[in-house]
Amino acid sequence: MDPALQIIEWVRLGYFPSLGVKVDYAYVMLFALFSLTLGLLLECFVVRQRT
């Protein structure tokens, strides 16, 4: 499932706790950490090449 949809469902659960939705929290958190790590590494290498 798409991580963006998982995040939207997680927010919806905050407003409607009795909603019958299942969110894979580990998947969302791992995707976020992976994206952040990849972005920071790319930013580090791009800045190093430009200077």
Image (tube, rainbow, N blue to C red):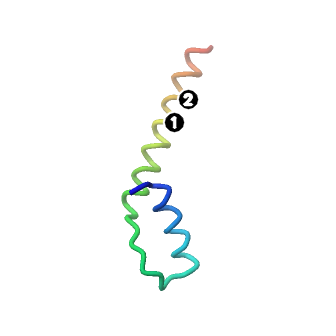
**1 horizontally vs 8: left or right:** left
Q: Position of residue 40 (x, y in %)?
A: 52, 35
Q: Position of residue 33 (x, y in %)?
A: 45, 48
Q: Residue at x 40, y 64 (%)?
A: 25
Question: Label for residue 16?
Answer: none
- Position of residue 40 relative to residue 33, above or below, is above
| Rendered-image quadrant of the C terminus | top right
Q: Which residue is mark 1?
A: 39
Q: Which residue is mark 2?
A: 43
- Position of residue 46 relative to residue 24, above or below, is above
Q: SS for tag 2? A: helix
| Rendered-image quadrant of the N terminus | bottom left
Quadrant hosting residue 27: bottom left
Residues marked 2 and 1 touching at CB (< 8 Å): yes
Observer-nearest of 37 and 1: 1
Q: Amino acid at mark 1?
A: Gly
Q: Amino acid at mark 2?
A: Glu
Observer-nearest of 16 and 32: 16
